[in-house]
Structures are given as structure tokens and as C-alpha cells.
Image (cartoon, helix red, strand yellow):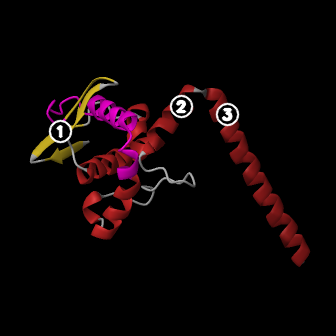
Amino acid sequence: MEITLRGKTYKAEYLTDLNYLPLGNLFLESDGQFALDDVTDYESLSNQRQFQLTQPMLKRMSDPDVKAAVAQSLSAIFPSFPKELVSYRGKGDFSLNINLPELLKITISCSTELNKKIPEQKKEILQANPEVVAKQDRIKQLEQELFELRNNVHSKMQA
């Protein structure tokens, strides 16, 4: 995945769920819902929707610990970001010189990319654990048998 900021393109070299976590936490709503669930493209957002999404982020970014975590996250995901843009050398030693729309764009792109990886990760986990695969196969078999049994009972009731 690549992101273009201020006319330059940067590659997300280490986009993992753990590196993404501080970015995603910016969009957790008070009821536990993730505000970006229905968002896959920054460019398609209306100005009003962008404003809605940046409000909780703005409030959270006023906390220096959150800003440090975001700087650490961005530095980990995009190690090619110039130090003038984002750097993290320790909890109290960081710089974060991006604006809210840029942060929103980055977070949406990362979230969308991670969501694409989820089916691949599930497949890898299943392939690595034959016991899970066997249990899933057995569940499918039982579901098929139940379906056939219901159809059989339904047919007999109509006769």
C-alpha cells in the first residue's frame, strides 16, 4: 500500500494490526463502534463526513500520550516518512507534523488495506492448524445433514 502526502508517495512497509492500533483507536466511538467501518476511500468522503470523523480524533489528539502513540505508529508503518513529517525516538521525544485530513487519509487507507488482509490471515491460520480445519469440515457436514433432515421432514409433512 502506498500513500501520497504533500506530493510525495510513501510505502507502508510494516502495516500490521499492532502497528495500526493507535491509529484505529482514534476512531473508536463511545459505544465501542469503529467509526471507519463503512469508509474505504478518503477521496469519496463528503466535507461533512470528513468533519464528523475528525471531531473525535481532534479531541483524542489533544492528549500528548495519544500523539506519541500515533507518531510511533506512523513511524513504524511508514519508516520512509521524513523526520520533519513524523518521527518517534521515545515517549517524550517525537514529532508529528501532519494535519488532521492527512491523518484521516492515512488511517482510512491503512484500515482498508488491513481489512483486505483479514481473509488471507484466516486462511493461513486454518492451514497451519489441521485440527481447526477438521472441526470446520465436520461442522459443514453436520449443517448439510441438518438441512437434508429438515427438507425430509418438511416433505413428509406435506404428503
Q: Is residue 60 magenta?
A: yes
Q: Looking at numbered disc 1 in the image, what kind of residue is underneath it?
A: Tyr
Q: Which mark is residue 134?
A: 3
Q: Distance of mark 2 from mark 3, alpha carbons?
A: 13 Å
Residue tagged 1? 10
Write down the region rendered in magenta: 57-85
Q: Looking at numbered disc 2 in the image, what kind of residue is underneath it?
A: Ile
State the image coordinates of residue 10 (x, y, percent, origin top left). Answer: 17, 38
Would you say the residues marked 2 and 3 are in contact, meaning their CB atoms lie under 8 Å apart?
Answer: no
Main SS class of the magenta portion in the image: helix
Give the vertical position of 71 relative to 141 (above or below).
Answer: above
* Label 2 or label 3, whichever comes before in sequence order: 2
Which of pointers 1 and 3 indicates the residue nearer the eye? 1
State the image coordinates of residue 117 (x, y, percent, origin top left). Answer: 41, 41
Q: Quadrant of the C terminus?
A: bottom right
Camera-side residue: 20 or 86?
86
Which of pointers 1 and 2 indicates the residue nearer the eye? 1
State the image coordinates of residue 42 (x, y, percent, origin top left). Answer: 28, 58
Label 1 neighbourhood size at 10 Å, few (<14), some (14-19), many (20+)? some
State the image coordinates of residue 45 (x, y, percent, origin top left). Answer: 30, 65
Residue tagged 2? 125
Label 2 neighbourhood size at 10 Å, few (<14), some (14-19), many (20+)? few
